[in-house]
Image (spheres, rainbow, N blue to C red):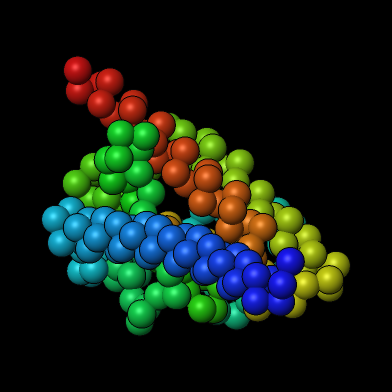
């Protein structure tokens, strides 16, 4: 085979690689645009409010009291205040959570400081009293993560300001926002899955009660 033929063969192979790369990038762009359109649609049509709310609840498990090791910025459990909805600037990422039928459940706002804000779809009227919110998401997921970090702080293996913590913002019995702080990549994967599953099951239960 001549040098020209070898060169042409190499150029053809390069052309094919470039075409495949372009096709892949175009597909990724379409997927990102579809996600962005969904987020915009949810924000505009579903009415995720950022108005002032009435109640805040910080559920905690029964753990050993270590007042000196608690992060100074942590609110007291069940202390009443007047929190607002999502207050961050431009989030690092926004992830919509949906049912298998593409119905909106919630939005997750990811902040650069490793905190996340979960805003349930307010048109669904998710209540803290609807299972499995308290017995699964709060007690078996959020509280256990917090308890584990509490122990690490007690053993001085984790700085108090890096401890996992969470706040549930309510308006009456309705969930308006879940703020979760100090979330690493591994925990985020579990939290995303757990939150979506919880709200999906809550929505199923709510619909069955309405029938």
Closest to the observer, 46 or 18:
18
Quarter of the image where one finds residue 99: top left
x 85%, y 67%: residue: 155
Please tell me whether residue 12 is drawn above or below residue 45 in the rendered image: below
So how many labels did they put on this image? 0
Q: Is residue 195 left or right of residue 161?
A: left
Q: Is residue 148 at all visible to an observer of this figure?
A: yes
Q: Is residue 14 left or right of residue 207?
A: right
Q: Is residue 32 at all visible to an observer of this figure?
A: no
Residue 191, position as x, y percentages in the image = 55, 51
Q: Is residue 82 left or right of residue 165?
A: left
Closest to the observer, 27 or 204:
27
x 31%, y 63%: residue: 33
Quarter of the image where one finds residue 205: top left
Q: Quadrant of the N terminus?
A: bottom right
Residue 63, position as x, y percentages in the image = 70, 53
Please tell me whether residue 121 is drawn above or below residue 101 in the rendered image: below
x 65%, y 76%: residue: 4
Q: Quadrant of the C terminus?
A: top left
Q: Is residue 81 left or right of residue 77?
A: left
Residue 183, position as x, y percentages in the image = 60, 65
x 26%, y 56%: residue: 38
Hey, which residue is sitting farthest top in the picture?
A: 211
Quarter of the image where one finds residue 53: bottom left
Hey, which residue is sitting farthest left in the picture?
A: 45
Residue 208, position as x, y percentages in the image = 28, 20
């Amino acid at each position: 085979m001549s040098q020209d033929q070898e060169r042409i063969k190499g150029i053809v192979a390069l052309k094919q690689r470039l075409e495949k790369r372009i096709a892949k990038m175009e597909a990724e762009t379409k997927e990102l645009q579809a996600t962005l359109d969904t987020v915009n649609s949810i924000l505009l049509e579903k009415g995720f409010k950022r108005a002032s709310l009435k109640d805040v609840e910080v559920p905690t498990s029964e753990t050993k009291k270590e007042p000196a090791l608690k992060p100074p910025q942590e609110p007291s459990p069940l202390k009443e205040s007047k929190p607002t909805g999502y207050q961050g600037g431009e989030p690092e990422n926004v992830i919509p959570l949906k049912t298998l039928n593409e119905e909106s459940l919630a939005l997750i706002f990811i902040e650069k400081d490793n905190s996340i804000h979960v805003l349930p779809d307010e048109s669904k009227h998710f209540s803290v009293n609807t299972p499995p919110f308290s017995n699964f998401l709060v007690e078996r997921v959020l509280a256990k993560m917090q308890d584990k970090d509490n122990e690490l702080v007690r053993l001085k293996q984790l700085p108090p300001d890096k401890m996992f913590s969470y706040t549930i913002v309510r308006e009456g019995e309705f969930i308006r926002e879940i703020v979760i702080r100090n979330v690493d990549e591994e925990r985020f994967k579990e939290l995303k899955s757990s939150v979506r599953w919880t709200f999906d099951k809550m929505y199923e239960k709510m619909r069955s009660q309405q029938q």
